């Protein structure tokens, strides 16, 4: 009887502390985990005049994203390229206020765009960074 009560209590504890999803919400996740997307629209499929267009999109996104973020907040921004788009987002995953610096944003997204041709979801410090090329126009479903 005592053994059954102990097992029931342990099962209840495990259920309580087990996250409901596999989304990376654990604060113990190391910087740079998560990785590149393996499917979907590629940056190579975007109709751009030059590589400078992608650089410009990253700069515009970081102008939008720089600044203070209250705890557990997310900002999204989208850039269109004819019939394609890039969905960007940054999320402060902590409960504390934190600041996104323009240069940190620029370096993070530039590195990810160059390394992950179908976009990525990464953690850098107190923020999740997402870049995701997709078909369609900004505001349409798909992506983030």
Image (cartoon, rainbow, N blue to C red):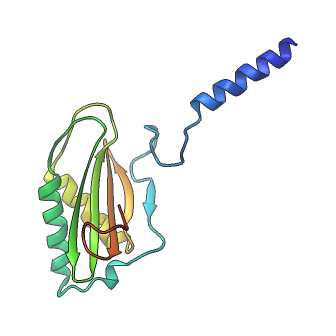
Which quadrant holds the N terminus? top right
Residue at 33% of width from left, 84% of height from top? 45
**Residue 9 falls left or right of residue 144:** right
Looking at the image, the residue that sits furthest to the top is 2
Q: Nearer the viewer, residue 31 or 26?
A: 26
**Residue 24 falls left or right of residue 77:** right
Q: How many marks?
A: 0
Which quadrant holds the C terminus? bottom left
Relative vertical location of residue 87 with respect to residue 7 in this rendering, above or below: below
Relative vertical location of residue 78 with respect to residue 83 in this rendering, above or below: above
Q: Quadrant of residue 143?
A: bottom left
- Residue 3 location (% of width, % of height): 85, 16
- Residue 20 location (% of width, % of height): 55, 41
Residue at 27% of width from left, 82% of height from top? 83
- Residue 92 location (% of width, % of height): 29, 42
Residue at 46% of width from left, 39% of height from top? 26
Looking at the image, the residue that sits furthest to the front is 140
Relative vertical location of residue 13 with respect to residue 137 in this rendering, above or below: above
Q: Nearer the viewer, residue 13 or 129?
A: 13
Q: Quadrant of residue 5?
A: top right
- Residue 48 location (% of width, % of height): 21, 85
**Residue 6 falls left or right of residue 77:** right
């Amino acid at each position: 009887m005592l053994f059954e009560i102990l097992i029931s209590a342990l099962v209840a504890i495990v259920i309580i502390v087990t996250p409901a999803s596999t989304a990376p919400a654990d604060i113990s996740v190391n910087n740079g985990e998560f990785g590149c997307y393996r499917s979907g629209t590629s940056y190579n499929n975007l109709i751009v005049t030059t590589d400078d267009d992608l650089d410009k999109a990253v700069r515009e996104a970081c102008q939008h994203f720089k600044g203070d973020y209250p705890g557990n907040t997310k900002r999204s921004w989208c850039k269109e390229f004819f019939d394609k788009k890039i969905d960007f987002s940054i999320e402060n995953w902590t409960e504390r206020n934190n600041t996104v610096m323009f240069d940190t944003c620029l370096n993070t997204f530039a590195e990810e765009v160059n390394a992950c041709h179908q976009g990525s979801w990464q953690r850098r410090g107190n923020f999740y960074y997402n870049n995701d090329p997709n078909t369609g126009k900004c505001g349409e479903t798909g992506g983030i």
